[in-house]
């Protein structure tokens, strides 16, 4: 009887240790948020966190990083991959204010993304923009 209790405790202890080891060895995935916003010069740009708004962006991330795109522009944007390992873009049509999509970069390599902008949302008159509208381009290096 005492042997069964000892064996049961040892088994539970080993199971708990194994669960802890599996959890601690799992890679920590980070999330980077990129916002598409309206600008008077160039119409729209993207911005990483509180960084400088730019029409062309270069980003370096580790495998497993999630990049979340948020559309705060006055027009819809469709996220499009132009180069790199084939990715499945879910919910790539960000067709309303605050619409978002996320992409997880699993494989090391170079990825290129752009957006296809639509027309301004009805009733969202922001005034005339200055200069030509920017075409958004992004390069993601996964190292």
Image (cartoon, helix red, strand yellow):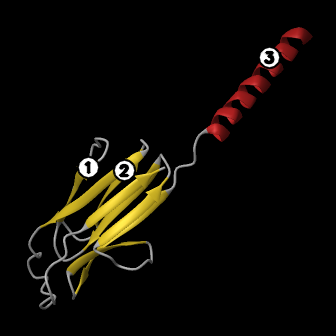
Apparent side of residue 28 relative to residue 91 in the rendered image (left or right)? right
Apparent side of residue 143 relative to residue 42 in the rendered image (left or right)? right
**Which residue bears the numbered disc 3?**
8
Q: Earlier in the sequence, mark 1 or mark 3?
A: 3
Which residue is depicted at the point 36% across and 50% down? 110
On residue 114, the disc is none
Residue 30 at x, y percent in the picture: 51, 55
Q: Are marks 2 and 1 in contact (CB under 8 Å)?
A: yes
Q: For marks 2 and 3, give the CA distance.
A: 51 Å
**Which residue bears the numbered disc 2?**
110
Apparent side of residue 28 relative to residue 59 in the rendered image (left or right)? right
Check disc 2 and report its element: helix, strand or loop: strand
Q: Within the image, what quadrant is residue 27 found in?
A: top right
| Foreground residue among 44 and 18 | 44
**Which residue bears the numbered disc 1?**
83
Q: Earlier in the sequence, mark 2 or mark 1?
A: 1
Check disc 1 and report its element: helix, strand or loop: strand
Q: Earlier in the sequence, mark 2 or mark 3?
A: 3
Look at the picture and state if 139 lies above or below 43. Answer: above
Check disc 3 and report its element: helix, strand or loop: helix
Which residue is depicted at the point 67% across and 31% down? 19
The count of marks equals 3
Residue 7 at x, y percent in the picture: 83, 14
Q: Are marks 2 and 3 in contact (CB under 8 Å)?
A: no
Residue 21 at x, y percent in the picture: 70, 34
């Amino acid at each position: 009887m005492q042997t069964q209790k000892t064996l049961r405790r040892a088994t539970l202890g080993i199971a708990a240790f194994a669960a802890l080891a599996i959890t601690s060895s799992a890679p920590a995935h980070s999330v980077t948020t990129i916002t598409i916003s309206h600008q008077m010069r160039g119409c729209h740009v993207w911005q990483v966190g509180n960084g400088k708004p730019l029409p062309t962006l270069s980003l370096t991330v580790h495998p497993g990083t999630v990049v979340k795109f948020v559309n705060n522009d006055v027009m819809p944007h469709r996220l499009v991959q132009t180069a790199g390992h084939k990715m499945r873009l879910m919910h790539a049509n960000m067709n309303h204010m605050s619409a978002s999509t996320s992409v997880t970069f699993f494989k090391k390599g170079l990825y290129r993304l752009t957006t296809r902008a639509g027309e301004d949302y009805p009733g969202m008159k922001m005034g005339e923009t200055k200069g030509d509208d920017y075409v958004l381009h992004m390069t993601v290096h996964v190292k």
